[in-house]
Image: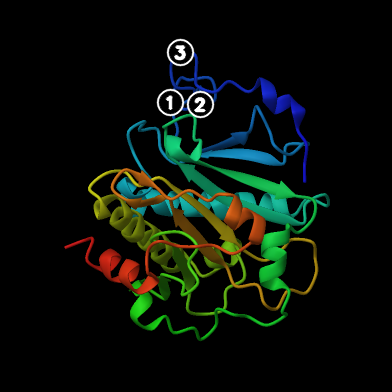
Amino acid sequence: MVVISARQDRPNLPAQSCPFCPGGLEAPEPYAVRWFANRWPSLPDDRAEVVLYSPDHEATLWSLGVAGAQKVVRLWAERTAVLGARPDVSYVLVFENRGPEIGATITHPHGQIYAFDVVPPVPGTELGSGSCSLCGIDPGLRLVTAIGGWQAWVPDAAAWPFELLLAPTQHVPDLPAVMDGGDPAAMALAQLLVDVLERLDRLFSEPMPYMLWFHQRPTDGGDWPAAHVHAHVAPVFRKPGTMRYVAAGELGSGVYFNPVDPDEAAERLRCAIP
């Protein structure tokens, strides 16, 4: 656990104009994509960053199209490499909280990056077996879409309605390694993100609030053979306008009760884009 009492003073909403629009507090100059150190960091020593996806206040990650999303992927990879090279950083977590239901206080399209000084428990548990659980996986009927060596599917033990996993079929450890594959590899990830996030918005014909995060190889210099970069997408609407809440019985037990069958979720997502 990390206690950052200074965040108690963080403003809940911008007082006036959007600070992420060009000319705003955090983006004084024109930009295509941009990163900056979080003014209200959850981690000290400039280990918490904000990533702006676009100067367009009304955009979403998927509405940027493949070319726009590819710029975001490239910036994620660059910041992972830079932060991961620091001696005080052992793990880089790229993530997005989308929608006020998730607690996003600014609607401008953006995500964040946390650079941890230790490997956090959740990715640490994923990596703990020492063998890759994603290589050779066959999602079967839970496959939603596959593009250019990447695939997206609903996990069989989904904790969230319409939850998705996105991963390359080949063993690629992290986002910088995706970029090492050249523009086609980055483009494939961008295409997949655009595809599945559009499906989520079309599912109920309204913006889907979601949490998105990438798990990738730790940067502590250790040997992590099980590291296979992948993204988790956790949507929080179980039906139009209706939140899926996680409450005491689930948090207290660690056992989650998903109201949407994973096979049904996959079928509905496959049909979400005509």
- The answer to which quarter of the image holds residue 173 is bottom right
Amino acid found under the numbered disc labelled 3: Gln
Q: Can residue 33 be seen in this view?
A: no
Residue topped by disc 2: 27
Residue 52, image x, y percentages? 49, 38
- The answer to which quarter of the image holds residue 144 is bottom left
The reply to whether the C-beta atoms of the residues labelled 1 and 2 are less than 8 Å apart is yes
Amino acid found under the numbered disc labelled 1: Cys
Q: Is residue 37 left or right of residue 166?
A: right
Give how far apart the Cα atoms at labels 3 and 1 are.
Answer: 12 Å
Residue topped by disc 1: 21
Q: Residues within 10 Å of mark 1 (few under 14, many from 20)?
A: many
Q: Earlier in the sequence, mark 1 or mark 2?
A: 1
Judging from the image, the colouring scheme is rainbow
Residue 205, image x, y percentages? 22, 48
Q: Nearer the viewer, residue 40 or 100?
A: 100
Residue topped by disc 3: 16
Q: Which of marks 3 and 1 is in front?
A: 3
Rendered view: 72 above or below 164: above
Give how far apart the Cα atoms at labels 2 and 3 are.
Answer: 15 Å
The reply to whether the C-beta atoms of the residues labelled 2 and 3 are less than 8 Å apart is no
- The residue drawn where x is 43% and y is 25% is 22
Residue 147, image x, y percentages? 35, 71
Q: Nearer the viewer, residue 185 or 7?
A: 7
Give how far apart the Cα atoms at labels 1 and 2 are.
Answer: 6 Å
Amino acid found under the numbered disc labelled 2: Ala
**Tag 3 secondary structure:** loop
